[in-house]
Amino acid sequence: MKYLVTGAAGFIGSVVVEQLTKNGHQVVGIDNLNDYYDVALKEARLARIQNPNFKLVRLDIADRDSVASLFASEQFDKVIHLAAQAGVRYSIENPHAYADSNLVGHLNILEGCRHNQVKHLVYASSSSVYGLNAKTPFATSDSVDHPVSLYAATKKSNELMAHSYSHLYDIPTTGLRFFTVYGSWGRPDMAPFIFTKKILDGDVIDINNNGDMWRDFTHVEDIVEGVVRIADVVPTRNSSWTVEEGSPASSSAPYAIYNIGHGSPINLMDFVKAIEDELGIEAQKNFREMQPGDVYQTYADTQDLFAVTGYTPKMTVKEGVAEFVQWYREFYNK
């Protein structure tokens, strides 16, 4: 197969590219290598991909003409769309970046699929769409109409946009609601990276909601296994589906939504303890209130994804934290 992977220099995207090329697929990756976080880290991720089946194109998905030209010239079989402006808190500070990348960019990818007979579009949604939902575990059959950040609202919008294109143009689309992903080559704006860096530097770490928070931490290797497998599970039309009786995660159109996570959340303090144990250093902690846009708990009901892919996460938090800390110390010479 010939794949397009957007966000190829990203945390998840770079590992997806690596896995697809190892599996013998031809991959074109696109990324604008913006400076939302350290560009050198993104370049280092790309440098690891030593495979003749991979080609990188430096491109912004918000650039309509460039995206259209790339689709027309390359004629992809499948698309894994992971590029986005990430980060909940940054969406409060810089909302227009989210409109450009997550809305305009997503539309440009949908248009590319529409005009070039792409067989399957897999795209990144987020667990943040569950917003004010209190029932756990979060299930794709739940309503997701009350986001608590603009980032979450853009991800919900991505799902709605994908459904309209599946319905109108018969494009098979699958949205994946990612839960908290961590592991080597991770993003510097995420808690595992922030905690590890600050503990090693002797700085104070901020603990939101006084530590009473739960996250469905999932190692990137497990996440990528799920992404690659779901690309082969192409949704089809279901003429018997109705809005009144069917799940919001399905449709009469060739459309599907899945949670992708570990399915077993752990307390934030237990995760911090795992990092402390691996580093052999006790963190200096500043306990504070819940922050704007944050949620108390994420907990994925992943049974539907497991059923169609056979995907089950293997990495324990202890193993995953050890893997991440080892990478961090080696990469940053700590």
Image (cartoon, helix red, strand yellow):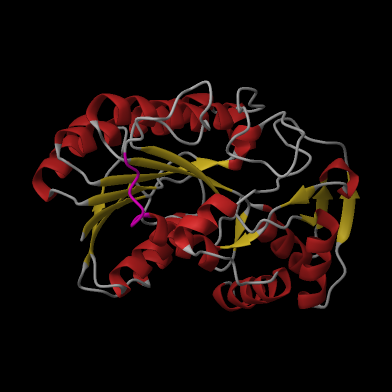
- The vertical placement of 202 against 100, above or below, is below
Q: Nearer the viewer, residue 252 or 88?
A: 252
Chief secondary structure of the magenta portion: loop
Position of the N terminus, as image quadrant, is bottom left
Is residue 260 in sight in this rendering? no
Residue 182 occupies which quadrant of the picture? bottom right
- The answer to whether residue 134 is left or right of residue 184 is right
Residue 54: x and y, percent?
24, 65
Residue 154: x and y, percent?
50, 28
Q: Is residue 20 magenta?
A: no
Residue 126: x and y, percent?
55, 41
Task: Residue at the far left: name it.
Answer: 73
Q: Which residues are magenta?
A: 231-236
Is residue 101 in sight in this rendering? yes
Position of the C terminus, as image quadrant, is bottom right
Q: Residue at x 16, y 44 (%)?
A: 70
Number of labelled discs?
0
Residue 84: x and y, percent?
44, 40
- The vertical placement of 6 against 275, above or below, is above
Q: Residue at x 45, y 46 (%)?
A: 35
